Image (cartoon, rainbow, N blue to C red):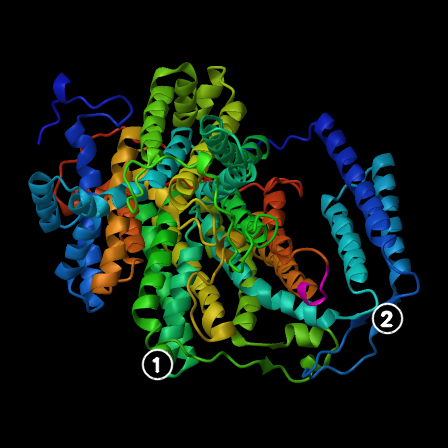
């Protein structure tokens, strides 16, 4: 494959140089390789790979037979129940993808500024708690005010949680990786306390009360389909982030700081302000992941609310090459994987943790494209590399 | 990497002096107002010195009047603070020491007023709890000194912990488990080394991938195999306590240092050995040269890649030992994600210890102390929610990372791949 890029196939700004084909090749092959190795792991552990991946597919996209029957029913009787049942797995995948999009964007924004935000997990949890609090404690507001308020509260909570490591990094040079991880643990403990104390609903379980109906993100279909406006909001935020990063001066500054802090400093850019701003925005996005999950899907926060979204988000950002569009695609992929894996676990008996194994492998393959190039005998193309992290300082 | 300028700028030095002075005064006031005034007059705090089941020679317990002790601590903090404001004290270590000591003593005396509190028990449990943190920190030190950051320590420890318990359960021999932990730790670290040294993958990203992979792998294997076959695969027993004759008779020090299991002894030996190797042998000099200025080292004929590989793999084996502590060293079974962030706290201890083995060990002890303090306070029913006590080590880590305890400077070439 040659690297002559016609204007037609030119990828949008920031995707990492070259054409779409070039930009997608390594991530796609990395995912494929991850799935193959995951399949080997499933096989070695004594399960049937085809049954497992078949269940994964049906769990992610739905059963084709049901789709067929659903359409038939719709056309013959005008009844939608069958079709709604058929699209359920697919909508569930989109529901799963929603927090991934937000959290992936959060980490991607950090990468663009040379900051590694591992704290999306904690920021998301704090965002969820803030949204839930506004959602259940304020009563009698119209939805048009209550819902945005609840989402903003989540974003603000996440932003504060992200800003602290950002400030410590900018002011004292404290490594954001360790600090965001510490903030994660603090968030977990704080939520343990809140859920067992001040924010606990009446009853035995450590959960918050349900949010008011006025704070819920409206759903598109009748129960049990949970697809809601959170998904649309996620796509809007992805576009907004693209616009911010690539069409505004501030976005350019942030990318400059990420690409070369010394040069950015010489150009008169304020590194400290950028670090704090980016970590706050990143935390805000992660907080919105929590908001969308609480207000759109769960309607309450319980122990173990954040099921590793923040860590998966790192894989997403790497997979999407820190580009909002790439992150959305990667998040959809992970949504399908995670959502399908639930079925794989119940039908084929393969623990859902296999997905984490695949993710770890995918991160390694993406970070070391040399391995993929070597495996598939690809020509070595010069690709603009985003600098991800810089030592301890 | 942006190097941090540590010029002694007079304005900053003055601000720091005043800052420490104010903090000391505030700590003194806090101790007096919050703890001292809340202590009932006439109550005593008993500090137990003897440990049940220990070989140490029994000595009488330390009984102190609670309020007087607390007020004395307040007075010391205020006095040192005033002295600092007026004259200035050179050593930040001493200042932090005074802050920590007065606060901890006052706090403990307050928490245990009218009750008995086993001091020796807490000190020796501090060392036990510090062990995995110290091993993680040593893994970090040896890697960073050669210029390779390893954020994947957490993942390595998890994998090694599981490998250790399975190997020990299957073979019915704890030493087999220990050897497996070392091998597996070394193997995962070798993968990290291969990725970051040969493939020049971003070191932090590789470490994070190892963490995610490790969490996924161990949870996968745990729910796929260990849960169903607990007796065969996940029930190893733990290393017995080995008492060193005579030395274990010393009060306080005996139970702390000389009545431990093999992993804790190995950890203490490693601290000393690594200090000697790193600072007094040609290999250590080479390691440090490669971490500071690989180009210069290369010019002098040192094989940069080889030195880095060896150090990262050795580090992985040390982390593997730390992983073994979690299972065959303490509870005898594997639980999902049982390392609970200790690998990361180890990294903080490494930075706090300024990339030296002894410093890393000392800071691990502080974390271990905070950890065991939190457990003791739960037992004493201190009216603070346990969740907040559990947060303490993480908050301490963050404070340490801000460099208030003196700037820590990493090896110059840390985190950078070397290209010939």
Residue A233 shows in this picture: yes
Q: Quick one: SS at disc 1?
A: helix
The residue located at (29%, 36%) in the rendering is A220
Image location (x, y in percent) of residue B229: 33, 77
Q: Is residue B250 above or below residue B316?
A: below
The residue located at (23%, 46%) in the rendering is A88
Classify 10 Å Cα crowding around label 1: few (below 14), some (14-19), many (20 and above): some
Q: Which mark is first along the chain, 2 or 1?
A: 2
Image location (x, y in percent) of residue B232: 35, 81
Which stretch appears magenta?
B378-382
**Residue A380 occupies which quadrant of the picture?**
top left
* Residue B232 numbered tag: 1
> Looking at the image, how many numbered discs can be counted on the residues?
2
The residue located at (41%, 25%) in the rendering is A260
Left or right of B150, for residue A192 = right
Image location (x, y in percent) of residue A303: 48, 54
**Residue A117 occupies which quadrant of the picture?**
top left
Separation of disc 1 and disc 2 at Cα? Answer: 49 Å
Asked if the magenta segment contains residue A216, the reply would be no
In this view, the residue in front, B6 or A99, is: A99
Left or right of A40, for residue B379 = right
Q: Which residue is mark 2?
A: B63
Image location (x, y in percent) of residue B311: 42, 55
Magenta-highlighted stretch: main secondary structure? Answer: loop
What subunit carries mark 2? Answer: B
């Amino acid at each position: 494959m040659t690297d002559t890029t016609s204007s037609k196939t030119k990828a949008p700004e920031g995707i990492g140089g070259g054409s779409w084909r070039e930009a997608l090749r390594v991530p796609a092959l990395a995912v494929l390789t991850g799935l193959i190795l995951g399949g080997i792991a499933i096989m070695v552990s004594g399960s049937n790979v085809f049954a497992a991946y078949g269940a994964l597919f049906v769990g992610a996209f739905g059963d084709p037979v049901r789709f067929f029957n659903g359409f038939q029913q719709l056309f013959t009787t005008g009844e939608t129940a069958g079709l709604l049942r058929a699209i359920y797995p697919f909508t569930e995948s989109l529901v799963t993808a929603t927090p991934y999009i937000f959290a992936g964007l959060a980490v991607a924004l950090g990468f663009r500024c040379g900051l590694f935000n591992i704290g999306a997990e904690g920021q998301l949890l704090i965002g969820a708690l803030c949204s839930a609090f506004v959602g259940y404690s304020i009563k009698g507001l119209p939805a048009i005010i209550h819902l945005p308020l609840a989402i903003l509260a989540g974003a603000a909570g996440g932003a504060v949680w992200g800003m602290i490591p950002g400030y410590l990094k900018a002011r004292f040079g404290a490594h954001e990786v360790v600090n965001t991880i510490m903030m994660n643990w603090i968030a977990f403990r704080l939520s343990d306390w809140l859920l067992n104390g001040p924010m606990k609903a009446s009853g035995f379980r450590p959960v918050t009360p349900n949010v008011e109906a006025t704070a819920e993100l409206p759903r598109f279909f009748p129960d049990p389909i949970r697809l809601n406006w959170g998904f649309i909001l996620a796509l809007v935020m992805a576009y907004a982030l693209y616009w911010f990063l690539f069409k505004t001066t501030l976005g350019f500054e942030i990318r400059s700081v990420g690409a070369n802090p010394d040069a950015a400093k010489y150009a008169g850019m304020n590194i400290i302000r950028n670090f704090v701003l980016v970590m706050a925005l990143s935390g805000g996005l992660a907080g919105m992941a929590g908001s969308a999950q609480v207000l759109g899907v769960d309607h309450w926060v319980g122990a173990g609310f954040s099921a590793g979204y923040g860590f998966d988000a790192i894989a997403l950002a790497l997979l999407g090459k820190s580009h909002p569009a790439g992150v959305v695609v990667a998040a959809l992929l992970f949504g399908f994987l995670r959502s399908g894996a639930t079925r794989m676990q119940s039908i084929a008996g393969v623990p859902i943790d296999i997905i984490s194994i695949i993710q770890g492998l995918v991160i390694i393959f993406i970070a070391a494209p040399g391995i993929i190039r070597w495996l598939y005998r690809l020509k070595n193309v010069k690709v603009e590399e985003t600098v991800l992290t810089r030592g301890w300082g | 990497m942006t190097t941090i300028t540590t010029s002694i700028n007079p304005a900053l030095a003055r601000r720091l002096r005043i800052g420490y002075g104010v903090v000391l005064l505030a700590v003194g006031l806090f101790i007096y107002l919050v703890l001292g005034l809340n202590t009932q007059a006439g109550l005593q705090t008993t500090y137990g010195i003897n440990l049940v089941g220990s070989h140490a020679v029994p000595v009488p317990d330390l009984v102190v009047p609670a309020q007087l002790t607390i007020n004395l601590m307040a007075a010391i903090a205020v006095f040192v603070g005033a002295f600092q404001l007026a004259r200035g004290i050179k050593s930040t270590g001493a200042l932090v020491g005074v802050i920590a000591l007065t606060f901890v003593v006052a706090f403990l005396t307050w928490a245990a007023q009218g009750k008995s509190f086993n001091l020796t028990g807490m000190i020796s449990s501090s060392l036990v709890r510090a062990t995995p943190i110290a091993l993680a920190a040593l893994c970090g030190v040896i890697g960073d000194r050669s210029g390779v950051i390893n954020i994947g320590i957490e993942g390595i420890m998890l994998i090694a912990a599981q490998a250790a318990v399975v190997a020990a359960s299957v073979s019915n021999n704890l030493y087999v488990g220990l050897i497996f932990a070392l091998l597996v730790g070394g193997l995962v670290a070798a993968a990290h080394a291969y990725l970051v040294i040969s493939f020049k993958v971003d070191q932090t990203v590789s470490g994070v991938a190892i963490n995610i992979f490790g969490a996924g792998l161990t949870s996968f294997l745990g729910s796929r195999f260990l849960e169903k076959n607990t007796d065969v695969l996940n029930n190893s027993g733990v290393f017995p306590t080995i008492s060193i004759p005579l030395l274990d008779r010393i009060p306080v020090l005996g139970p702390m240092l000389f009545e431990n299991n093999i992993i804790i002894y190995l950890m203490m030996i490693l601290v000393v050995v690594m200090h000697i190797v790193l600072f007094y042998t040609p290999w250590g000099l080479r390691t440090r040269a490669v971490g500071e200025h690989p180009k210069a080292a290369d010019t002098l004929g040192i094989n940069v890649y080889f030195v880095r590989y060896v150090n990262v793999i050795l580090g992985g084996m040390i982390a593997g030992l730390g992983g073994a502590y979690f299972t065959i060293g303490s509870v005898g079974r594997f639980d999902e994600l049982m390392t609970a962030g200790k690998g990361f706290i180890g990294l903080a201890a490494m930075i706090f210890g300024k990339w030296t083995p002894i410093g890393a060990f000392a800071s691990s002890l502080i974390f271990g102390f905070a950890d065991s303090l939190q457990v003791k306070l739960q037992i004493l029913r201190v009216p603070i929610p346990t969740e907040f006590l559990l947060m303490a080590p993480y908050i301490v880590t963050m404070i340490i990372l801000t460099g208030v305890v003196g700037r820590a400077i990493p090896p110059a070439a840390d985190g950078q791949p070397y290209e010939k």
